[in-house]
Image (cartoon, helix red, strand yellow):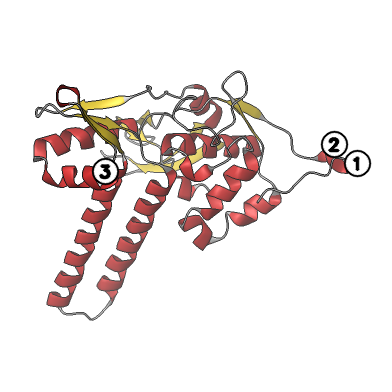
């Protein structure tokens, strides 16, 4: 939560100051007015976390439903006026920048070697990750064989929180089933219900990523959410797969997630990924 600054407070000289300025992976054109206030360079300033921010991130319920991160982003990046509208690409970059501004540290990750299973500890330089971000193109389109053109955008932060919450619930269900005395039939029914819920969430996320469907030859341009959802239900699998592939690709743009890892024990090398899941930020 941000608080109004009293201009006559003699202690203002000790307040937090901006540690860095950054561009967003989405650039300056993805959001409507009122969501982000960029400076003349197309950048936004990042403050380190306050003690209150750190306490906010220790609330597991607020962290899981996204409210903790929304509060921290609003408090540490005052140029962000509506964090709920942020794309996941920008959220990952901002959380990384806030962590770097606060701790000036690296992101540590333990990764097992796929060849021998040895647990390797790696440290990712956060400044390097911020300095080497990729940026989104202004538009992403999928041209279907039917003649329709589908305009795609990445996930928003609420989309990601919804998916992560679903994963958490499914994981909890699996653990409960393994430890319970349910019959095999009851377990099968519960797993079937769980998979159905996962399928519904994946469909919702996919539908949310479609901005519009256009066919200029027929003077069609549709943005209505109900029409788009019905469109997704009724197109063929190959068309749906093409859309899904582009969505997956553009959601990876921004902070560089992959790096070449080498096993300390057997020297095997492979391409690995760092988890920038914002819910794991703390």
Q: Residue drawn at (49%, 45%), measured in percent from left and top?
A: 84
In percent of width and height, residue 107 lies at 51, 38
Would you say 40 lies left or right of 63 here?
right
**Helix, strand or loop under label 1:** helix
Q: Which residue is mark 3?
A: 206
Nearest to the observer: residue 91 or residue 261: 91
| Distance between mark 2 and mark 1 Cα atoms | 7 Å
Instruction: Categorize mark 3 by other alpha carbons within 10 Å: few (<14), some (14-19), many (20+).
Output: many
Q: CB under 8 Å between callouts 3 and 1?
A: no
Disc 3, SS:
helix
- Tell me if residue 99 can be seen: yes
Q: What residue sits right under mark 1 in the picture?
A: 10
Residue at 70% from the left image edge and 51% from the top image edge = 51
Camera-side residue: 142 or 112?
142
Q: Are marks 2 and 3 in contact (CB under 8 Å)?
A: no
Residue on which the image places disc 2: 13
Q: Residue 268, how many percent across, how many down? A: 30, 31
Which is in the foreground here, disc 3 or disc 1? 3
Q: Earlier in the sequence, mark 2 or mark 3?
A: 2
Q: CA distance from mark 3 to mark 1?
A: 51 Å
Per the rendering, the mark at residue 119 is none
Q: Is there CB contact under 8 Å for labels 2 and 1? A: yes
Q: Residue 190's spot in the image, x, y percent?
A: 20, 70
How many residues crowd mark 2 within 10 Å: few (<14), some (14–19), many (20+)? few
* Residue 62 falls left or right of residue 208: right
Give the quadrant of residue 39: top right
């Amino acid at each position: 939560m941000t608080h109004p600054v009293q201009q006559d407070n003699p202690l203002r000289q000790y307040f937090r100051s901006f540690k860095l300025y950054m561009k967003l992976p989405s650039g300056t054109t993805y959001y409507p007015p009122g969501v982000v206030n960029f400076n003349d360079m197309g950048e936004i300033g990042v403050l380190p976390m306050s003690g209150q921010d750190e306490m906010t991130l220790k609330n597991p319920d607020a962290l899981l439903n996204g409210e903790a991160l929304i509060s921290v982003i609003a408090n540490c990046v005052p140029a962000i006026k509506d964090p709920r509208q942020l794309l996941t690409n920008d959220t990952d970059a901002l959380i990384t920048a806030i962590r770097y501004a606060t701790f000036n540290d690296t992101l540590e990750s333990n990764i097992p070697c796929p060849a021998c299973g040895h647990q390797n500890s790696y440290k990712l330089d956060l400044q390097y990750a911020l300095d080497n971000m990729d940026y989104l193109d202004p538009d992403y389109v999928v041209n279907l064989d039917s003649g329709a053109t589908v305009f795609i955008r990445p996930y928003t932060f609420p989309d990601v929180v919804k998916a992560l919450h679903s994963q958490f619930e499914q994981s909890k269900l699996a653990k409960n089933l393994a430890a319970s005395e349910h019959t095999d039939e009851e377990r099968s029914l519960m797993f079937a219900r769980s998979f159905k819920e996962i399928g519904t969430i994946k469909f919702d996320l996919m539908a949310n990523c479609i901005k519009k469907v256009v066919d200029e030859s027929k003077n069609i341009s549709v943005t209505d959410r109900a029409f788009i959802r019905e469109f997704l239900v009724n197109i063929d699998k190959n068309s749906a797969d093409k859309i899904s592939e582009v969505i997956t690709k553009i959601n990876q743009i921004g902070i560089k997630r992959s790096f070449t890892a080498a096993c300390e024990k057997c020297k095997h090398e492979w391409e690995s990924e760092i988890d920038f899941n914002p819910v794991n930020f703390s």
